[in-house]
Image (tube, coloured by chain):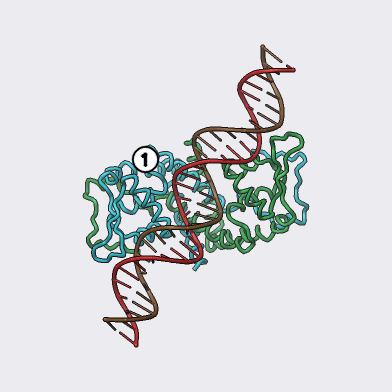
Chain colours: A cyan, B green, C red, D brown
DNA sequence: TCCCATTGCATAGATTTCTAAGGAATTATC
DNA sequence: GATAATTCCTTAGAAATCTATGCAATGGGA
């Protein structure tokens, strides 16, 4: 959308010494792509009564069921309070059961319900088709170059944060 | 982190017909990168008393000051209630003034304060250096290929949502 | 002029995420 | 074995986002 100027002011030149248009920022490009992915995922899985917040946890539990909340947090890459909230909603939605571990009563094991297991294949297909649609018209060698570059960026940034 | 199996169950084979490991998903790679960018940005601008939610609006206002809330929402790419909330916090933080338009009393013009203008160059430098750090060790031609690919993905996804 | 559709902003309520701090179970140390 | 440190989960509170809805100003058509 074009920017009309009218009575609006442009900052004086000395205030604009630093320029950094969003289109030149990898961060902005990544953000836009992320939002596009998220929006589409959110809409498609909503049809199954699954929210985006639940999705990431299902994704991990579909690979390894019965993890503790801490293990889940680590694998999903979220902080523990986030996990508590997500699991609460998943339990309400009948997707998981939380079972206090007999061996170590501090731990809570998270187990998928039959319902969540039944959703697995269909929801993973949803994810795959979103990816396929995103990758339309992009050559395989470009895709693998893309993966290498974005992986490198993430690693660079993660390293900085120690 | 390796996944120990112990007593945890793997789903039976017929439930695993669809496989889609996160490492093969462009969506996951984009999500990880986005989170890495955001975390670093958030930490660095916090030193200036600016939050991530305010950042995107500053970014636009530093280019064109005095936009209405609706125009701001469109340029930032957020819904209007989000803009309301962000601007409220920015007004509290002394970054903007909201002025009801004399010409059309429905509109609210958003103007940067002197403080926000003073922050501009330093904060844009912060953004640029985060980008530079993310791009460390990536060749220029790889970077431009990356931009083309991720832009294409975003466009593909946006097109689907109509 | 008066009505009503449109436009612009705001509120309400939900979700997803974080940091900071607390409580309960377990393990280590003396 | 008693105390201290650690581990695991939870609560509290804030921020950033959305959808759905409401209200107030404007402008077009009868």
**Chain ID, mark 1:** A
Relative to B111, is A107 above or below?
A: below
Q: Which residue appears at 62% of the width and 57% of the height?
A: B50
Residue A131 position within the rendered picture, expressed as x and y whole percent measured from the top left: 41, 44
Residue A40 left/right relative to B53? left
Q: Quadrant of the N terminus of chain A?
A: top right
Residue highlighted by disc 1: A49
Q: Is residue B121 visible?
A: yes
- Please name whichever residue, A146 or A105, is drawn nearer the observer in this view of the structure: A105
Mark 1 burial class by Cα count in 10 Å: few <14, some 14-19, many 20+: few
Q: Which residue appears at 54% of the width and 63% of the height?
A: B136
Residue A67 left/right relative to A144? left
- Please name whichever residue, C21 or A110, is drawn nearer the observer in this view of the structure: C21
Residue A51 position within the rendered picture, expressed as x and y whole percent measured from the top left: 40, 44
Relative to A141, is B158 above or below?
A: above
Number of labelled discs? 1
- Please name whichever residue, B126 or B49, is drawn nearer the observer in this view of the structure: B49
Q: Is residue B149 visible?
A: no
Residue A75 position within the rendered picture, expressed as x and y whole percent measured from the top left: 37, 59
Mark 1 residue element: loop
- Please name whichever residue, D26 or A140, is drawn nearer the observer in this view of the structure: D26
Q: Which residue appears at 65% of the width and 60% of the height?
A: B125
Picture quadrant where residue B106 is located: top right
Residue B105 left/right relative to A145? right
Residue C4 position within the rendered picture, expressed as x and y whole percent measured from the top left: 62, 20
Picture quadrant where residue A60 is located: bottom left
Relative to B65, is C7 above or below?
A: above
């Amino acid at each position: 959308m074009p920017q009309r100027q009218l009575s609006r002011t442009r900052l004086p030149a000395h205030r604009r010494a630093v320029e950094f248009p969003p289109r030149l920022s990898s961060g902005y490009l990544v953000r836009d792509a992320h939002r596009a992915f998220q929006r589409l995922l959110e809409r498609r899985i909503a049809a199954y009564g699954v929210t985006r917040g639940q999705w990431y946890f299902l994704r991990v539990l579909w690979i390894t069921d019965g993890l503790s909340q801490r293990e889940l947090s680590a694998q999903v890459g979220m902080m523990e309070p986030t996990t508590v909230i997500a699991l609460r909603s998943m339990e309400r939605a009948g997707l998981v059961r939380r079972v206090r571990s007999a061996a170590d009563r501090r731990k809570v094991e998270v187990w998928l319900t039959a319902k969540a297991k039944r959703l697995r294949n269909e929801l993973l297909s949803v994810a795959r088709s979103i990816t396929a649609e995103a990758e339309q018209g992009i050559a395989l060698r470009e895709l693998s170059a893309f993966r290498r570059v974005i992986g490198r960026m993430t690693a660079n940034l993660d390293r900085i944060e120690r």
